[in-house]
Amino acid sequence: MSAQILVIATPIWMGQPSSVAKMALERLDAELAETDEQGRPSMYGKVAVVGNEDGAHHVAAEVFQALNDVGFTVPAAGSTYWVGEAMQKLDYQDAGPKPETTGNATATLAANAAHLARLLSGSPFPAS
């Protein structure tokens, strides 16, 4: 609860986020009724980012919507992914040279998330 940034990193199973990622989102559903002392949802002022593999845009949209529902803010360029070759077993950590575009997207995501978290920490959303 004290973290300013939440990272959801998930593989894709049949075009969906993993069951573990879905369980995390389901647990966050309990926060829908929770508010701070000013009546704002308890997740307001926190930043959420998503990392995933195949089906990246679909899963990012699904996860971002769930996180937004409970009050998280999504930074610009708030997702990153590496898909590799379809139907292969090569994991990103085991791949040879990493694609420069993936590294750049991940660096941008991290910088934007940290920047947004600092901004929200210094200037929170108004009370409800």
Image: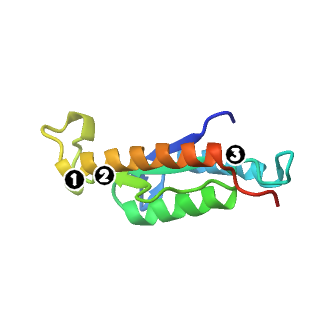
Who comes first in sequence, dot 3 or dot 2? 3
Q: Nearer the viewer, residue 14 or 25?
A: 25
- State the separation of the CA atoms marked 2 and 1: 6 Å
Question: Residue at horizontal 33%, vertical 57%?
Answer: 54
- Confirm or deny contact between disc 3 and disc 2 (CB under 8 A): no
Residue under label 3, please give it: 27
Residue under label 2, please give it: 105
Residue under label 1, please give it: 101
Q: Position of residue 47 (x, y in %)?
A: 57, 48
Query: Could you classify mark 1 by the number of other residues whose Cα lies within 10 Å: few (under 14), some (14-19), or many (20 or more)?
Result: few
Nearest to viewer (mark 3 / mark 2): 2
Q: Residue furthest front?
A: 122
Q: Nearer the viewer, residue 66 or 101?
A: 101
- State the separation of the CA atoms marked 3 and 1: 33 Å
Question: Residue at horizontal 58%, vertical 63%?
Answer: 65
Q: Nearer the viewer, residue 15 or 125?
A: 125
Query: Could you classify mark 2 by the number of other residues whose Cα lies within 10 Å: few (under 14), some (14-19), or many (20 or more)?
Result: some
Q: Which mark is residue 92?
A: none
- State the separation of the CA atoms marked 3 and 2: 28 Å
Q: Is residue 15 left or right of residue 54?
A: right
Q: Secondary structure at mark 2?
A: helix
Q: Secondary structure at mark 1?
A: helix
Q: Position of residue 43 (x, y in %)?
A: 70, 48
Question: Residue at horizontal 13%, vertical 37%?
Answer: 96
Q: Amino acid at mark 2?
A: Ala
Q: Nearer the viewer, residue 66 or 125?
A: 125
Q: Amino acid at mark 1?
A: Thr
Question: Residue at horizontal 23%, vertical 57%?
Answer: 86
Q: Position of residue 116 (x, y in %)?
A: 52, 49
Q: Secondary structure at mark 3?
A: helix
Nearest to viewer (mark 3 / mark 1): 1
Q: Amino acid at mark 3?
A: Arg
